[in-house]
Image (cartoon, grey):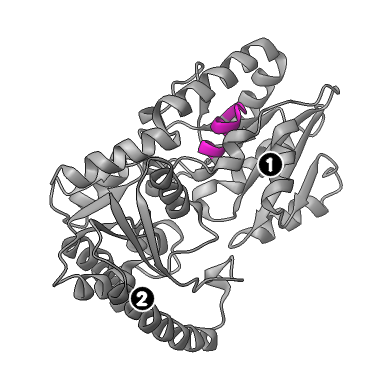
């Protein structure tokens, strides 16, 4: 299979790169018509308005460059547009009208669900929300195949955004090679180490995690929180409280340093948001933990049940601080059970989200049209 990876998909977001890595390992030939629009900008919602004008100019120059590269490259079987490629897809569709490669759109998120429903950055019912919804719908309708990270998320695209049934296919997110090579080796001291890393958006439920940390202030439990973003002020306030010695906040860690932290923690936390989106997705960090064999505590949801089983391959709980704290204490008091869950979680990853399985899921999605 010859695949052209087209657009400005974010190098700081693993989804597209993991899938392309998996396809290369399966023998696919990948041509990159790509430019990194988002280099140096981890938190896109924090950009000042004037910066968007500079981005528009940078984007136009990038599209012209990769369009020239596209026409100079041989015809591909699949034209792939990755994460945050809603505008990229429109250009790809125009360029592909003569070549007629199979046009695959991998949005990974719905802009409407993320910005309007989940983060509530844009008010529902207004003109901006209507335009964002249209920006979701049009690229999906132009694409031949639309990828989703879970069946639940795919159902949202079908039922809410009107994408034709049968066009949406599930391909799990997976994890990059460095995560798959690393192995869990928890610390042996008496303090139970809990790791959470994410952008602090409502999806991740950071306030519930902070509540759990407060409830466990008198227990030998240490929380390492890595990240920043929309709700980081809540983390800042929690760290500044008198009884906050059990919380360590690191605004950023490079990949290798994060993996090192993950190897020695006792459990990794997933997501605990109570939004619609939180029930539909399995975040990248859950796949990363599973790939390493790190036991994971995350919220119970229809999406997570597509991959994991409570008490067998993960510890699933509710979305409030009480239930998260109870899950952490239960994990701390039964390390043998925790080891069994870690092994089963790693097995679930191998059976469903390894590079071999991602490539297989992609091939089936492309050929079932």
Q: Nearer the viewer, residue 49 or 341?
A: 341
Q: Which mark is residue 69?
A: 2
Q: Earlier in the sequence, mark 1 or mark 2?
A: 2
> Can residue 219 be seen here?
yes
Q: Nearer the viewer, residue 94 or 230?
A: 94
Residue 193, image x, y percentages: 75, 31
Q: Residue at x 55, y 37 (%)?
A: 320
Which element is circle 1 on?
A: helix
Q: Nearer the viewer, residue 84 or 203?
A: 84
**Residues in magenta, as a range:** 286-296
Tag 1: Cα neighbours inside 10 Å, few (<14), some, or many (≥20)? some
Q: Nearer the viewer, residue 252 or 120?
A: 252
Q: Residue at x 69, y 14 (%)?
A: 335
Asked if 348 appears above or below 162 in the picture, the reply is above
Q: Residue at x 33, y 71 (%)?
A: 88
Residue beneath disc 1: 259
Confirm whether the magenta stretch covers residue 231. Answer: no
Asked if 9 appears above or below 241 in the picture, the reply is below
Instruction: State left or right for residue 44 relative to residue 5.
Output: right
Name which quarter of the figure residue 237 lies in.
Answer: bottom right
Residue 218, image x, y percentages: 82, 30
Residue 148, image x, y percentages: 31, 47
Name which quarter of the figure residue 3 lies in.
Answer: bottom left
> Can residue 126 be seen here?
no
């Amino acid at each position: 299979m010859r695949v052209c990876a087209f657009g400005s998909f974010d190098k700081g977001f693993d989804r597209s790169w993991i899938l392309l890595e998996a396809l290369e390992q399966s023998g696919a030939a990948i041509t990159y018509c790509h430019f990194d629009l988002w280099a140096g900008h981890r938190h896109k919602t924090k950009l000042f308005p004037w910066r968007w004008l500079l981005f528009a100019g940078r984007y136009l120059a990038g599209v012209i460059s990769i369009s020239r590269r596209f026409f100079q490259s041989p015809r591909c079987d699949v034209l792939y547009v990755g994460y945050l490629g809603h505008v990229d897809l429109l250009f790809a569709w125009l360029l592909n009208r003569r070549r007629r490669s199979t046009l695959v759109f991998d949005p990974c998120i719905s802009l409407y669900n993320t910005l309007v429903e989940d983060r509530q950055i844009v008010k529902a019912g207004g003109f901006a929300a209507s335009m964002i919804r249209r920006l979701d719908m049009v690229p999906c309708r132009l694409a031949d195949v639309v990828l989703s990270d879970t069946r639940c998320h795919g159902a949202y695209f079908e039922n809410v955004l009107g994408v034709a049934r049968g066009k949406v296919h599930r391909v799990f997110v997976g994890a990059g090679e460095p995560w798959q090579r690393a192995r869990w080796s928890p610390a042996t001291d008496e303090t139970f180490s809990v790791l959470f890393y994410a952008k602090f958006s409502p999806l991740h439920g950071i306030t519930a995690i902070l509540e759990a940390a407060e409830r466990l202030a008198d227990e030998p439990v240490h929380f390492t929180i890595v990240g920043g973003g929309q709700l980081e002020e809540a983390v800042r306030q929690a760290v500044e409280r008198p009884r906050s010695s059990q919380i360590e906040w690191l605004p950023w860690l490079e990949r290798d340093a994060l993996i090192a932290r993950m190897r020695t923690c006792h459990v990794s936390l997933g997501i605990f948001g109570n939004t619609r989106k939180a029930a539909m997705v399995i975040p990248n960090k859950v796949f990363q933990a599973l790939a390493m064999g790190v036991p994971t505590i995350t919220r119970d949801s229809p999406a997570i049940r597509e991959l994991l089983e409570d008490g067998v391959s993960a510890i699933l709980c509710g979305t409030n601080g009480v239930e998260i704290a109870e899950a952490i204490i239960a994990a701390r008091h039964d390390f043998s059970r925790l080891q069994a869950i870690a092994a089963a979680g790693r097995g679930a990853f191998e059976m469903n989200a390894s590079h071999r399985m991602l490539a297989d899921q992609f091939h089936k999605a492309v050929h079932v049209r």
